[in-house]
Image (spheres, rainbow, N blue to C red):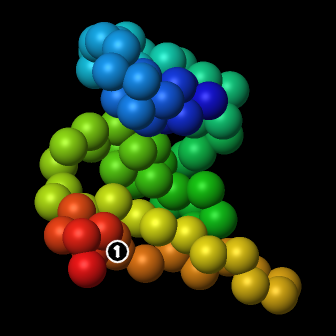
Amino acid sequence: MASAEWIEALLRGTHVSKESVIAAVTGSRAAAKHRPGDSALPLEDVNCAVAIDAFEFAMKTERQPQRIIARQFFQQDSKQ
């Protein structure tokens, strides 16, 4: 939920500190389910989720029958 609130704040032009988002994500019940070495819920997923602005792209998802596909989305893609 914290990640969604961060994105919403960015879209609305509202300030939310990265530190508060990171604390909310790492302290969440969902993050607590992740364990080192767990292939279904790897701890590395949490670390990736809180790597705010670490990458030059976002992940755009598309729902397809029986699955969701995620692909890299670069800002210049929206100007084409």
Residue drawn 83% across the image and 87% down it: 65
Q: Mark 1 = which residue? A: 72
Q: Is residue 12 visible?
A: yes
Residue drawn 42% across the image and 24% down it: 12
Left or right: residue 42 compared with residue 57? right
Which quadrant: the C terminus? bottom left
Which quadrant: the N terminus? top right
Residue at the extreme bottom of the image, as rendered: 65
Residue 61's place in the image compared with 56, above or below, is below
Residue 73: percent from left, percent from top: 33, 70
Q: Is residue 25 visible?
A: no
Residue drawn 34% across the image and 74% down it: 72
> Splitting the image into 4 quarters, where does residue 22 fall?
top left
Residue 26: percent from left, percent from top: 46, 26
- Secondary element at image label 1: strand
Residue 9: percent from left, percent from top: 42, 23
Identify which residue, 42 or 11, lies in the foreground: 11
Q: Residues within 10 Å of mark 1 (few under 14, many from 20)?
A: few
Left or right: residue 31 compared with residue 72? right
Left or right: residue 51 compared with residue 39? left
Residue 36: percent from left, percent from top: 47, 51
